[in-house]
Amino acid sequence: MKRSYEIVQMDVIRWAEARGIIQNSDAKTQLLKAVSEMGELADGVNKGDRELTIDSIGDVLVCLINMAAILDLDIVQCLESSYQEIKDRKGYLTKEGVFIKEE
């Protein structure tokens, strides 16, 4: 059974609160942890290790959810804000990895 993002997000926040992470950590600490997890994610992607990639994406998300909670931000609203900023951009990504903007 697949659970919704919102349910998993609340589970992560409750888990972090039960361990004192939300109350005793700060945004900078969670940011540094997320950057560390991004290094593991890069490792997983570069090595083609699917399990490490899955675990690392999840770990990065946990850190970002924690950071948003510490800052009293709704992470879905943060995502929505970014989407609203990019949704009308025109262009495409080339095979070489270069994004070509269309005016």
Image (cartoon, rainbow, N blue to C red):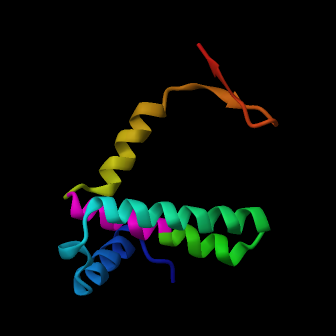
Where is residue 84? Give x, y as percent: 40, 35
Where is residue 43? Give x, y as percent: 69, 66
Residue drawn 28% across the image and 60% down it: 27
Compared across the picture, whether 58 is left or right of 78 comes to right
Residue drawn 51% across the image and 71% down it: 58
Compared across the picture, whether 2 is left or right of 17 comes to right
Q: Is 100 placed above or below 49 here?
A: above
Is residue 24 rendered magenta in the image? no
Is residue 65 rendered magenta in the image? yes
Where is residue 61? Give x, y as percent: 45, 65
Q: Is 6 placed above or below 72 here?
A: below
Front one among 101 and 30: 30
**Residue at the far bottom in the pictured view:** 18
Front one among 99 and 4: 99
Compared across the picture, whether 102 is left or right of 63 comes to right
Q: Is 17 placed above or below 91 here?
A: below
Q: Is 16 placed above or below 30 here?
A: below
**Residue at the far top in the pictured view:** 103
Give the quarter of the figure containing the C terminus: top right
* Residues shaded magenta: 60-71
Residue drawn 63% across the image and 21% down it: 101
Where is residue 47? Give x, y as percent: 78, 68
Residue drawn 63% across the image and 17% down it: 102
Magenta: main secondary structure: helix
